[in-house]
Amino acid sequence: MKRIVVITTGGAIGARRGPVVGGATPALKGEDFLALLPRQGIDLVFEEFANLPSSHVTPIHALELSQRIETLLANPDFDGAVVIHGPDTLEETAYLLDLTLNLSKPVVLTGAMRSSASPGYDGVVNLANAIRLAAAPEAYDLGVMALFGEAFHAATTVQQIHSQMLTSFESPGSGPLGWIEGERVVVQQRPFLRQHIACQRIEEMVDLIRVTQGADVRQLRHSIEDGVAGIVIEALGGGRLPPWWLPLITEALHQRTMVLVTTRCAAGGLGDEFGYVGAFHDLRRLGVLFAQHLSGPKARIKLMVALGAARTTTELRGWFVG
């Protein structure tokens, strides 16, 4: 019999209404979930890591969770792990876990878009499917995954694309790794962007700035003056910025602040053929780092992990090649 550890962190899946506050808050425990789940012939062990809404979860929490999962799955008695997590920052936790864990055993994050008090509660089916996926031989060496409904996605590509719908998670540009069909786990593709960074600490002082039409440089200037270790910029298109951003980026780099550029688009990489000021060629000339095929929030997580792990600038840059 397969044995899966289910780690609870809080979120809507475990939320119910209480007499004190006006809305649902995280409350359900492992034994509550066990009573709701159908019997699947899988031995389950529940462990409470935290009981937080995911809007309260930080990258420090996520790194501690990574270290706990690594310890648990080093035990040969466990075949995989499921992490119960709120949807708001699930994609960031999933990506940090995928970067920092070097495991063959499956790790699946899931949650719910509705609280247990809602008529549309989706927590039981999501958790049951996540457990089935974590116990499946087909899920080995797929890295960390996120599952909502029947579809499961790679941590590197999954994004929450809707704030309310039950089917809120997708992988723009690549699609899911596969899906659950009854008792079958169907894998249609394998993740292609996985990377491992051994990490014991992260650099918290990393800002994320999104470029908009005509945007001025106040946020960028404040980040530089605050002495942050890194700045992630969600650029336009394939990596383009207004020309008045270039002098401050140059200043940041001279101060040894790492500047990482990704696209604000939902999918796609960086690079173009244009020669005007502020296009991709200017950013490459300045020596910024590039986060290919990563959303802004995930690019920030990667830079936090890389800055915490790198012993040299050369090693740091090596994690952003391609």
Image (spheres, helix red, strand yellow):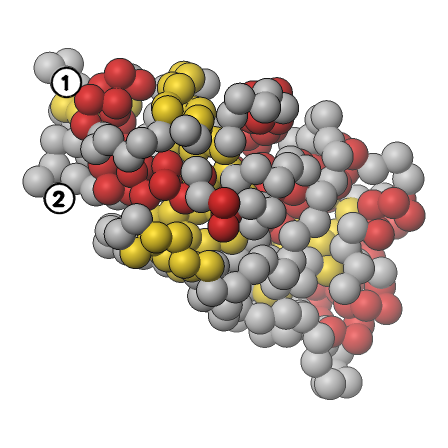
Q: Amino acid at mark 1?
A: Gly
x%, y% of residue 182? 26, 52
Q: Secondary structure at mark 1?
A: loop
- Mark 1 — residue? 18
Mark 1 neighbour class, 10 Å CA radius: few under 14, some 14 to 19, many 20 or more:
few
Residue 216 seen in render: no
View extreme (left): residue? 119
Q: CA distance from mark 2 to mark 1?
A: 18 Å
* Mark 2 touches mark 1? (CB < 8 Å): no
- Is residue 250 depicted above or below 28 in this figure? below
Which residue shows up at 81% across the image and 68% down it? 284
Screen quadrant of the N terminus:
top left
Instruction: Using the rendered view, name the quadrant where residue 75 is placed.
Output: top right
Q: Residue at x 26, y 23 (%)?
A: 34
Asked whether 7 or 190 is in front, the reply is: 190
Name the spot of residue 80 as percent of width and height, x first.
50, 33
79 shown above or below 225: above
Q: Give the side of residue 251 with respect to residue 241, left or right.
A: right
Dot 2 or dot 1: first in sequence order is 1
Quarter occupied by the C terminus: bottom right
**For numbered disc 2, what is the local secondary structure?**
loop
Question: Which residue is at a point 14% across and 18% down the rendered structure image?
Answer: 18
Q: Residue 264, position in %: x, y?
A: 54, 64
Q: Given this view, does label 2 or label 1 mark the residue nearer the observer?
A: 2
| Residue located beneath label 2 in the image | 120
- Compared across the picture, whether 296 is left or right of 292 comes to left
Q: Residue at x 36, y 41 (%)?
A: 132
Name the one closer to the observer, 269 or 150.
Answer: 150
> In x, y percent, where is residue 45?
40, 19
